[in-house]
Amino acid sequence: MDDLEYGTRNKRGDWQPHQSLNVAPFWRLPFSGGKILSWLLSYLFGWNLLFFASALVWWFLVLPDVETMKTLSAGWIVRLLVANWVAIILFYGIFEWRFYKRQAQDRRFKYNGKFPSEQPSDVFWFKSQNIDNFIRSILISVPIGTAVEVIALWAFASGAVPMIALADHPVWFTTLVLMSPIIHEAHFFFIHRAIHWPPIYRLVHSVHHNSVNPSPWSSLSMHPVEGFLYFASVFWQFALFSNPFLVVFQWNLAGFGAVVGHIGFDKLEVTPDTAIDSHAYAHYLHHKHFEVNYCDDGVLPWDKWFGTWHDGSPESEKLMQDRFRKKRERLNRKTSATPPQ
Ligand SMILES: [Zn+2]
Ligand SMILES: [Zn+2]
């Protein structure tokens, strides 16, 4: 496919789409029934359906019955950890292998003109973004995330928090399934905003932002504190009279869903003439500019509400630069008002 029909490439080789990002159509006027319908179809049958299907597989093939999960025994915990490891390695690995190792579509639709393997850097273990990100994901984030998942499953199974059954409360159960992606987005926005507070950023979140040019393995490349906070989204199910199945769905949304923003390509070519949208642009802009798009372009426009939305357009760029300039001026005023020691 000719990516220059859909965007432009600058002198550095970075590609930018013509089409700016949009918040969900029910937040935009005038309302368009067609756009709302197509948005709903992609919400129900896009990535979310894949993560829901994965939760069903986990529920029926990986996890034991609720009775067994009343006890924190090594058998089911290790099986869950191994399943999470294998699934993350395979799922992320497919994107890594096809688009970064084989470079199946070369640099077409690639936001950053370079591949991480072309940019060795001292900020990464072994000077390699790929090796560093892989090790951090597999040895830090997945075990910590699985520990969080185990605690949540055990809390429901043991009766420490109340739970409902699908048969008794099918409407509430279905509502929770539909709400889980919204819970994930809201949780991610607020913890992400919090870890951008400079003292925490330097200690914690800077690890994730070492990858200015993110690739699939960057998705869960996190400091342990961020890994814990990220997967803590499953604890919201405690407050909702939920069910351990929803814990698994919430976890898979976070664990597998993290790759979406880090694919690095705007479109993924399926055949020489067709491609699917990756939905990676909002989070790519976050890695590029740091203080925009703390959440993706999901159901609720959190960034728009909090003044940190960047849709990729020149207007958004100007708003962001104005915001950065005001922040610098504020900091300079503070510094000059501090009496010399
Ligand atoms: Zn990221
Ligand atoms: Zn960030």
Image: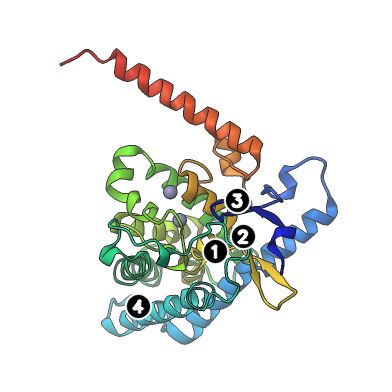
Point out the frontmost of discs 3 and 1.
3
Query: Residue 340, percent across and down?
Result: 19, 14
Is 308 placed above or below 264 here? above
For mark 4, what is the residue? 81
N-term-proximal mark, 3 vs 1: 3
Q: Are marks 3 and 4 in contact (CB under 8 Å)?
A: no
Q: Residues within 10 Å of mark 4 (few under 14, many from 20)?
A: many
In the image, 179 versus 49, the foreground residue is 49
Quadrant position of the N terminus in the picture: bottom right
In the image, 291 versus 229, the foreground residue is 291
Q: Are marks 3 and 2 in contact (CB under 8 Å)?
A: no
Kind of residue at disc 3 = Asn
N-term-proximal mark, 1 vs 2: 1
For mark 1, what is the residue? 260
Figure quadrant of residue 228: bottom left
Q: Residue at x 83, y 49 (%)?
A: 32
For mark 2, what is the residue? 279
Residue located farthest toward the left when viewing the structure as drawn:
341
Q: Are marks 1 and 2 in contact (CB under 8 Å)?
A: yes
